[in-house]
Each structure stands twice: as structure tokens, then as C-alpha cells.
Amino acid sequence: MCGIVGYIGNNDSKEILLKGLEKLEYRGYDSAGIAVKNENGIHVFKAKGRIADLRGIVNENVMAEIGIGHTRWATHGVPSMVNSHPHQSESGRFTLVHNGVIENYDLLKREYLADVRFESETDTEVIVQLVDKFAHEGFETLEAFRNTLKLLHGSYALALLDAEDNETIYVAKNKSPLLVGLGDGFNVVASDAMAMLQVTNQYVELMDKEIVIVAKDEVTIQNLAGETINRTPYTAELDASDIEKGTYPHYMLKEIDEQPAVLRKIIQAYQNDQGQLKIEEEIISAVKAADRIYIIAAGTSYHAGLVGKQFIENLAKVPVEVHISSEFGYNMPLLSERPLFIFISQSGETADSRAVLVQVKEMGYPALTITNVPGSTLSREADYTLLLHAGPEIAVASTKAYTAQLAVLGILAEVTAKSRGLEVSFDLIHELGLAANAMEVLCDSKEIIEVMAREFLSVTRNCFFIGRGIDFYVGLEGALKLKEISYIQAEGFAGGELKHGTIALIEEGTPVIALATQESVNLSIRGNVKEVVARGANPCIISMNGLNMDEDSFVIPEVHELLTPLISVIPLQLLAYYAALHRDCDVDKPRNLAKSVTVE
Ligand code: AGP
């Protein structure tokens, strides 16, 4: 979370920084700021709220060819002007932006900076004050920066300006994402290539504990020992239109609509010349060598993992456990003899998942990352990667990445099954193709779902999602979508579990959204609906064609029973979208959240 940018070149930096921050706003939007430097010194502009608020207070008349910027997701200290970045050292010489968390900031404050007056409550300010302290002791800026980094425990992506140096942005990274972008007569810094696509598509990846000296004509990467590191730049394969909303009112709606195309792209990407599904041999060997798979993920990706377990156990017959990443590291279960870890993460940057990856790599176990972002931290640090091919997902609420995760997990399960000589009783390519068609039908049903959102969700405080088996897992995802963007308290439950406590919460009119896409539990989930209706609930049954009954509110097209989650989630995504819209919520940037959760 938090996004950082930097620019050094021959043009005025303000607009480049502001545009970059707008592209990074998905990473946090509590407050924002930029610092630009010219012959008159460093000028800092900060605003609580969105980048649009920051734009409103930036002085147009200040021209500066070097600058850094930040959009914040608060960790230490409330969102406020004083806690927003950039932060400056007491003397005013150094100015810094930071993404990450410095775990030992309090200790450093007491040990090294007892006589320094701090302005903010942030952990970040310790860094900039330490650099100043070392500079004051006689160290050159680079050395002062290096000395500081050696004291930090935690995660950081940093960009630093020195008021006495017009030629350099000092940059460093550990655990938090950061890239340097290369231009002709200028260079840039960004948390994500998307931010600076406006000026370059050439980027250099940075590794943990590296320092970069960014000048307008030169970029020098060093390790903490001061040794120079050579790294070949890469071209960011992103199309600027991928990150625009186009005619859509919200990214979330655009991304919901992109799902059929993404699914078709995945079918293509994972197919060989003979028209069969393929996955690199070494990945399949790793899956086959495992006696148990541990899926580690958070949020929506965790929900995809729960469905993925069904795919892998059903088709490939390998036992699977699914764990929430923030729990796993502290409460590790007894592991099997030959585990394989699968990390599912849209962003590939989720700190909770990364912490587990570091642990299991230290233990010597193989790891596969399923991610949407090539070159992301989880992708780089795992042994193997499978890509989602979903294109940038900008809305905080994950939609197309979820269905892409399901598709890739299904393909992994099928290819493993076949490679183990197991029979797969259906043609997955064909069934995924039908699922893509069904997705299209659902994306064309927006008007009906908007009416349903009004009917069931316009005045309620809470809402329950129920299902059995695979429908239960989709219900968990439906509830997460609804609560995160509409702020309606929503929970997913196994249909049979309600009567063991939760049914006490059902009141007159409480909406209960029930999924009925599985033949084996169709009657029992409908029995659970009757139980809540008898207690006053307002039921909304979403069933699959062939299993539908008169009382159902919405019927999804028929697809293979195992693949229903790819389809049944779409009306739930749209219900959440319209419920949020009807309540005037900020659909793409819900309160308190950020797209990429890079703090533990
Ligand atoms: C879902 O809508 C979320 N915004 C969130 O739960 C997300 O899925 C979670 O933070 C994990 O992110 P990742 O997939 O990038 O690891």
C-alpha cells in the first residue's frame, strides 16, 4: 500500500508526478503529497484526501525538474496533513517518501534521535531524520542514506531528495515494490510501471536491499556494501488503454465485463499447438511430487483457493489445504512430508502471503505463485509462476482476477490429472468456452441485477449469503464483495451451519442470498432457505438453469457443475456494484482499503 513516484529530467515534474500518483491511487488514498526542487529550494505540497485535492493546492507557478510524490494508506498515525508524505528532516535538508513499515522505528527514535523534534506520528519520519543525523556527522548523502538503511527493520520503498543536490534522487527498496523507469534525458521512479507508462515503458527491476542513485542521464544500482550491480531493463508489456476506464463509469464495472475475454485469453495462453491444455513440465512434476498442496492466500484470492481445492482434489486427486496467509505463518499446521505451496495473489505483492513464502523457502519447500503481475515479488521469489493474463485490475474489489484464478487452478488440476494418468470425464477447454459464453449472458443482465440490488439491498444494514459445497465458497466471495464496497455488513455461511447460531440474526426483511447451482444439495439448500423465510428473511435465490424453481430470483446459464463458481459469482459482483452505487459509495476506492496490501 502507498504509492511512490519520482522524476528527474528536463521537464517540469509536477504534472508527471500528479499523473503518476493518479495511476497509483489504487494503492492508498488517505492523503497525498509531492516535493519538487528547483534553484529556490524544495517545495512541498500536501493534502488530506485524494490526488484531486492535492492538485487543487499545488502552486502552478513553481517550476522544478526534479521531484518525488506519494499517495498514502495510513499505518502509523491518522490520515492528516501532518502525517502525509513527503516528510522532511528537522533541518529541512532532506525530504522523503516511503511505502512500507519500519518495525523498529520507536527503538531507533529513542536510541539515535532523542534530541530531534518530530512533526508526525509516522514511522517514516525516523528514516529522514536518521539520514540528516548521519549527514550532520559528516557523511556524504549516499553514505548517510546507506547507514540509515542498515539500521532499518521492516519494509520500505524510498525516494529521497537532498536540498543541496540538484542532480539526484536517492532510492532504496526492501520488501515493498519499486521500479526505476528509463527515459531519454530523464528517469523516473514508481511503485508500479503503470504509474509512469505515460513517459516510458522501459523499466529496471530492483531487488531487496538495493540502493539506486537516479540522475537524469544515469541510473546506478548498488548493494548495501556499495558494490555496483548491472541489470538489463525490460519493456513493460502494458497497453496504456488497459489502465483507462474508457466509457465505463467505474473500473469495477469494466473489469466485470472483461471476464469473458479474460477467460478466452487464458484458454489460449494455456493451450498447445495440438489444442490441448498445457502447463510447464517442471510445474506439473512439482505438483505430482507433492503428497499435499498448501494453498496460501488472502481475501478474494483465499476464496479462489477454496474453490481451487475442489478442482485439484476432484480431478488430480491430490489432497489440498487452504490457509489464510496472515494466520499460517504464526500458526503453522503439521506439514506433510512432501508439501508443495501454492500462493495465489492478484498483485503478487501481498505482504502476508510473502511472509509465508519467505518462511517456506527457508524450510526448503517448493513454491508456485499464481499471479496477475509478472515480475511481482511473489512471482520472483517462488520457484514457479502461473500467470492469470487478466490485464491490470485497478478497482480495489477484485473481480476478473478471481475468475481468472479459478480458470488457472482448473487448468492446473486438469493437466496434473492427465499427467497422472487419471481420467477427466469432460473436455475442460470446451467447458471453459461455454463458461465464457455464459459469462457474456450474465454481463448482459445488468438491468435485472440492478433491480434486484434495489429490491434486496437498498435499505438493509446486513445481508447473508448461503450455499452448500462449492456454492458456500462463492457465497463467501459474494459477501466480501458486498461488504467491501457497499459497507453493508455481509457474511457468507454454509447453508447447514446457520441453524447452529447465525439464524438468531435473521429478522423481518433480512436479505438472504442463496446459491443453488449443485444438484446434490439443491433440495437441502432450499430447505435452509425455508428455515430463514420462516423467521422473516427476504430470500433471493440464484440458481442454475436445470435446477431452478418458481421462487428463484435469478437463473444463471447451465455450465459444468464444477465450473459454476466462474459464473455464479458474476451476479454477486454486480449486486455488490449496484448496491454500492445506490448508496453513493465510492465503488472503485472504498473507504479504509487499498488494492495492494503490502503491510503485514
Ligand atoms: C478483494 O476484493 C480484495 N480487495 C482483497 O481481499 C484481495 O483479494 C486481497 O487483499 C488479496 O490480494 P492479492 O490477491 O493481491 O494477494
Image (spheres, helix red, strand yellow):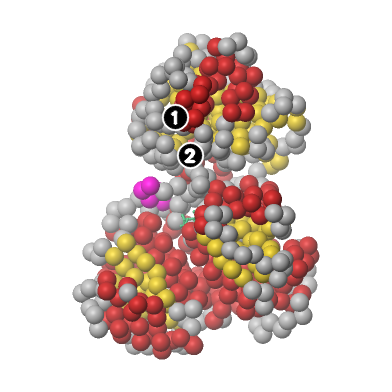
The answer to whether residue 454 is left or right of residue 239 is: left
Q: Position of residue 514 (x, y in %)?
A: 38, 77
- Mark 1: secondary structure: loop
Residue 582 appearing in the image = yes
Q: Can you say whether 7 is above or below 351 in the image?
A: above
> Does the magenta-highlighted stretch encompass residue 50?
no
Magenta stretch, overall SS: loop
Q: Position of residue 436 (x, y in %)?
A: 56, 71
Q: Can you say whether 354 is above or below 34 in the image?
A: below
Residue 63 is tagged as none
Residue 69 appearing in the image = no
Residue under label 2: 2
Q: Does label 2 or label 1 sit earlier along the sequence?
A: 2
The answer to whether residue 231 is left or right of residue 439 is: right
Residue under label 1: 85
Q: Amino acid at mark 1?
A: His
Q: Residues within 10 Å of mark 2 (few under 14, many from 20)?
A: many
